Structures are given as structure tokens and as C-alpha cells.
Amino acid sequence: MTDHTNPTPADSAPAETEVLIVGGGPAGSLLATLLARRGIRSVLVEKQTNLERSFRGETIAAPSVTSLNRLGFGPALRAHGFLETTSVTTIAEQREVLHVDYRKFAGQPLPIDIPQPSLIRIFNRAAADLQGHVYLSGWAFSSLIEEDGVVRGAVLSRGRGERVSVRARIVIGADGRFSKVRKASGLAADIQPMARDFLSFKLPRPPEWGSAAQLVIERDKHLVILPTFPDTLRVGHNLPKRGLGELRAAGFDAFKRGIMAISPQLAPLVDEHLRSWDDTGFLEIFTAEMQEWARDGLLLIGDASHTATPILGQGVNLAMQDSITLVPVLAAALGRGGPERVLTKAEFADFVATRREHKLHVTGFQRMQEANLAVADPRGVKLRRLKYRLLNAFPGKYRVFNKVINAQHAIDDVDLALARTGGPRAVDAADPSPYEVSAHD
Ligand SMILES: Cc1cc2nc3c(=O)[nH]c(=O)nc-3n(C[C@H](O)[C@H](O)[C@H](O)COP(=O)(O)OP(=O)(O)OC[C@H]3O[C@@H](n4cnc5c(N)ncnc54)[C@H](O)[C@@H]3O)c2cc1C
């Protein structure tokens, strides 16, 4: 069920289900698994036939580590292996200006790094044998089935014109930042491009690097350097909006020299291991915000409902917290009325309000940080260094950072989710085979 190389046959698609989830990323796959544990029938539709995806969010923030442990995924995560990030250091114009040691956040686990395909596999394997769970691999959402303005399901398609219709009491759009479900829903999204885009690449991580992250700033250029499981560094570099063409025109060697000038510490690795543009991945940075995430019969979650930027690595965290918070709400709503009743928008109003608040908290901080990183004039650059230094010396530093990066909106909801399932269940890693690392993974 987990890693298909062929699409699921059309006759495996039921004509109806309770919950139809479009998109098997972190949000959709976790949601499907948690629903299956409660015996709720769902169909998870994923357009890809394998889970390999390059340059995606791999960071699981501390609150989500807590949630996953409490939901019983700890043994599977440990059996796979992951990397704990111990600290983040900000270096501005070659000087260390701010150091945050994650080990000083009282009562919090360390954030962890695990490849996104592995995380999704862990979720999918936990659901594979549970009754009522159907995974349709290689099928894409095509259109909504609507009757009298109410969503009643979706039409799925694959290959050359093959189609199936699946009716459901609720369609959940978890199909990512370019969500087709969102477009089909007619719900308005405010899409705001950020001033800069991002180029990422990976380098081997020397043992002496340890598991510390760095933000390296040189005027209006910066590198985010994240230690990544099992043995790499993931590096993100900002580019001017639509600046990829210009960068490429200047040539790959000029790009490498630019990176080496920002971080002399990284220079020998870049020089030796970064070979061509094929080693890099481009990410267009924008935020998408929506007032409404729901219609009668439809709800959006994860990046489909709120797209964040990579700053602080919160995308996967937000997506999973959506799913964890949603499960008890969905279960209660499905329990009301008969098996035919479509779930209404009003039933998700509190869920949307809670999750929007968390998301706005994150994107608000990301905008502030982005503006801070974009400063180029010498006075502004000096002032920025001073601000970082003052923050570094501020006795309440850890309280401030804990509030910003460890917002804990969903943890109480895990309690609620567990209360209704009778406690955490350990999830074993079903496949103990060593993790296979793809070129971009
Ligand atoms: C290139 C890239 C780099 C990123 N880097 C970072 C980072 O460094 N840090 C960070 O925190 N976040 C990062 N993110 C964001 C992070 O990966 C997302 O926030 C997170 O994966 C959101 O999870 P999701 O489940 O909502 O959506 P996604 O992970 O996007 O999953 C959506 C799923 O829906 C499927 N799908 C799409 N359309 C259809 C359809 N029509 N029918 C069926 N299935 C469909 C897709 O194949 C995918 O599996 C990055 C994202 C991208 C694209």
C-alpha cells in the first residue's frame, strides 16, 4: 500500500465513503491514518505512484514531535532513525550574533529531521491493514461532484481519460500549495508572493558539524543551513523574485562563488560537492491565506488552506497539526445525523478559527523575519546586527523563542484524540529495511 509503482486499479475505488481525502502528503496521510484508527471509512487519493519527493520540508518542530510521540509513532520514528537539531546560530557578516540552544526549552523535545517520504511511509504503513482505509495511488482529483451548491464527492482521473466518481460526506483538500481542490471549490485565496524565492541544495555533512543549524546573513543575502538525516546539510539560499534566469545566466561557478563568500565555513564543501544546477531545487515563495477553508461538504487543510514560507521550517508542522486537531472534530461531526448527511461548513468554524490563528502567528513572524533579512543598506545592516545581539543578551530570550517557534496549539487536541481511541498505540516500523537515499533525498 505504501510505495506503489503502479496506480491502484479503478475497481479498488469504492463508489462512496465517509471521508474523501485528496493528497497524500504529511497532512492527508496522517489524517487518513488517524481516521482509520478510529474505524472511520476514508479514501486517500494521491496522484503520485511513489512517495519520493525532493527538497520538501523535513523538519518536525518540537510540538509535533510531542504530538507524534503521544499518538504512538515514536517507535516507528526511532526504528527508522532521525536527526535531532540541537541549536541554531545566526551569523551576520561573518560574526556570530545570536545563538539559541534548543536544549534550553524546558519541557520540549528537540526538533527532528526525517525525510518526508519516510515520514509519510510511517503513517501509511500504520493505516495499511486497518479496515475501512483505502489508498488510491496514481489517481488525481479532477473535479467536484456538486448538487444544489453542496459538495457530494469528487471525480478522480488517471492516464488517458480513465475516471471514477467517489461520493463522500466530506471532501478534504490536502493537495498542497497549488491545490486543485481549492481552485475547484471557488473559495478565495489571497496569494502574496514574497520578495524573494529560494534555491536549495544538499551537501555531505562533515562529522565535526554536529547537528546545529545556522542562519548565515551577508547584507541582503542569506543561507539557511539545516543538518539533515542521515548525513547531509540542506542549504537554502534566497534569490531575488524571478531571479533564477539571471543567476543561471551568470553561470554555475559564479553561483558557487557567491555561496562560498557568504559562508566560508561551507566553502570547501560547496567547492568539492556542488557540481551543476541539477544539484539544486527551486522553490517559489509565496503565502496563501484564506478567510474561509470550508463549504458544505468540503474542507481544506495543510498547504492547500495556508501556504507558509520555509522560514523556521513550519510547513510540515502546520500541516500535521491541522490533521491532529481535525480528527476529533470530524469524528464528532460524522457521528451526528444519518450516514447520508453531508457535513456542513458551520461544523468546522471553530476548527478553522483555531488553525488560522496558529497559521497567522507563523506567517506573521515569517514576514517580519523576511523583511529583516532583506535589509541591504549599511545602516540597516548594522542595526540588524545590533538587534540580534540585544536579543542574544536578553534574559527572556528563551521565553520569546519558545513562543515563536513552539506554538502548541494542537497538543491539547492530541489528548482529545487519544481519549476517544483509548490511549496511544505503538506503531512499529513495518519495514526494517535500511532507508534508501535517492539523489535528491
Ligand atoms: C520544493 C519545496 C521545498 C520545501 N521546503 C520546505 C522546508 O524547507 N521547510 C518546511 O517546513 N517546509 C518546506 N516546504 C513545505 C512543506 O513541504 C509543506 O508545507 C508540507 O509538505 C505541507 O504538507 P501538505 O500535506 O499540506 O502538502 P504536500 O506535502 O504538498 O502534499 C500534497 C500532496 O497532494 C498530492 N496532490 C497534489 N495534487 C493532487 C491531485 N490533483 N490529486 C491527488 N493528489 C494530489 C501531491 O502529490 C502531494 O503528495 C517545501 C515545499 C516544497 C514544494
Image (spheres, rainbow, N blue to C red):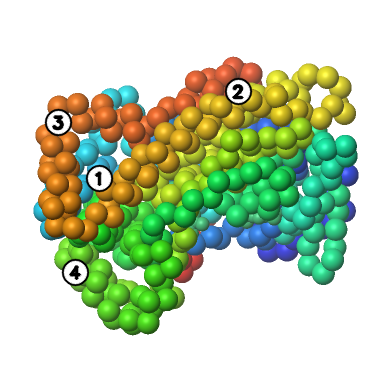
Name the residue located 54 percent from the left edge and 23 percent from the top edge: 413
- Apparent side of residue 149 relative to residue 323 in the rendered image (left or right): right
Q: CA distance from mark 3 to mark 4?
A: 30 Å
Q: Secondary structure at mark 3?
A: loop
Question: Residue 130 lies in what quarter of the image?
Answer: top right
Residue matched to label 2: 350
Q: Could you tell which of marks 3 and 1 lies nearer the N-terminus?
A: 1
Q: How many marks?
A: 4
Toward the viewer: 240 or 8? 240
- Apparent side of residue 146 relative to residue 286 in the rendered image (left or right): right
Q: Could you tell which of marks 1 and 4 lies nearer the N-terminus?
A: 1
Report whether the residue tagged 4 is closer than 8 Å to ligand 1. Answer: no
Residue 261 is marked as 4
Crowding at dot 4, Cα within 10 Å, few <14 / some 14-19 / many 20+, comes out as few
Residue 289 is marked as none
Residue matched to label 1: 88
Q: Secondary structure at mark 2?
A: helix
Crowding at dot 1, Cα within 10 Å, few <14 / some 14-19 / many 20+, comes out as some
Would you place residue 264 above or below residue 20 in this image? below
Mark 2: amino acid: Asp
Q: Secondary structure at mark 1?
A: strand
Q: CA distance from mark 1 to mark 4?
A: 20 Å
Mark 3: amino acid: Phe
Q: CA distance from mark 2 to mark 4?
A: 49 Å
Residue 24 visible at all: no
- Image coordinates of residue 122 in percent, x first then y, are 56, 45
Q: Could you tell which of marks 1 and 2 lies nearer the N-terminus?
A: 1
Q: Could you tell which of marks 3 and 4 lies nearer the N-terminus?
A: 4
Disc 1 versus disc 4: nearer the observer: 4
Toward the viewer: 65 or 338? 338
Residue matched to label 3: 394
- Dot 3 and dot 4 residues touching (CB under 8 Å): no
